[in-house]
Image: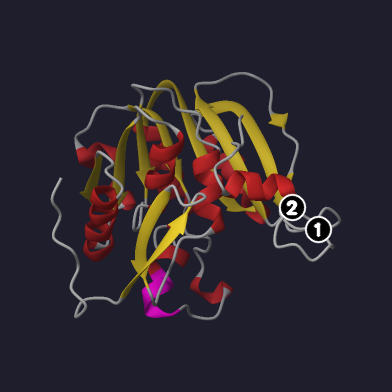
Amino acid sequence: MTVAPLSQAEVEIVENAVLGGRVRLRQPVRGYRAGMDAALLAAAVTAEPGQRVIEAGCGAGAVLMQIAARRPGVFLTGLERDPAMAALARENAALNRVEATVVEGDVAAGFRALHLPPFDQAVSNPPFFDDPGALRAPAPGKRGAWMADDGLKAWTDFLLGAVREGGRITVIHRADRLADLLALLGEKAGSFAVRGIHPYADEPAKRVLVQAIRTGKAPLRLLPPLVLHDRSGTKHTAEAEAVLRGETALPF
């Protein structure tokens, strides 16, 4: 796979190693850069070899590359509306020798606009805000990652349309949007499983991982939380560090 790299004139790039060094990731120096949320989302994907997985809003491909490292034999597709980030995702796929298809397009146009058959799984880290008045205006390079111009419903509608019956949807989002996620995904999906991501054991969750099954009917399951930090001064808890290094997953 040969991909023409982005020029320095277009965007300044830095390369980092993630997932314990198993993945090399090139990202913009300025603007949005994928971090822990991407790692946690990839760790929650349960795809088996031969299954097809699509990511809505793949950015530079951080989640796709980590899924590929964790789940060999999975067929990956990413959707990204920013041409520069889509090009960078393709470059990262080449860098990591990952066979992934990156399609340029907008989630708001819906899944049907891609003219692709339904996938086995769909994943996303949607923009965390859909009300410009809810936060100080983000830097231009971060706006697309932070602001859902068409609202969270556009993202859930895309994910619901992207999977076959019985297909899985996995999302990481703000904990205070959990009720919205359940309501929106619940229009066509069920069998929810929710895992809270807590900064400390004695603090409320700031993030949630939510998995739903299209047409699923099973009762909601509240899974054990992941605690990221303790008060000992270490960067992460042992459990969180194992997840971030790719030594363990966050199964549903």
Q: How is the image coloured?
A: secondary structure
Q: Earlier in the sequence, mark 1 or mark 2?
A: 1
Principal secondary structure, stretch drawn in magenta = helix
The vertical placement of 77 against 135, above or below, is: above
Residue flagged by tag 1: what amino acid is it? Asp
Front residue (pair 23, 116): 23
User: Mark 1: few, some, or many residues within 10 Å (few <14, many ≥20)?
Assistant: some
Report if the CB atoms under discs 1 and 2 are less than 8 Å apart. yes
Report which residue position mark 1 lands on: 230
Q: Residue at x 38, y 38 (%)?
A: 68
Residue 62 visible: yes
Q: Is residue 140 magenta?
A: yes
Front residue (pair 29, 224): 29
The vertical placement of 48 against 185, above or below, is: above
Secondary structure under tag 1 reads: loop
Secondary structure under tag 2 reads: loop
Which percent across, then down, holds residue 25? 37, 58
Q: Which mark is residue 124?
A: none
Report which residue position mark 2 lands on: 237
Which percent across, then down, holds residue 127? 47, 59
| Location of residue 53 by image quarter | top left
Residue 147 visible: no
Q: Residue at x 52, y 50 (%)?
A: 20
Q: Which stretch appears magenta?
A: 139-143
Q: Is residue 20 magenta?
A: no
Residue flagged by tag 2: what amino acid is it? Thr
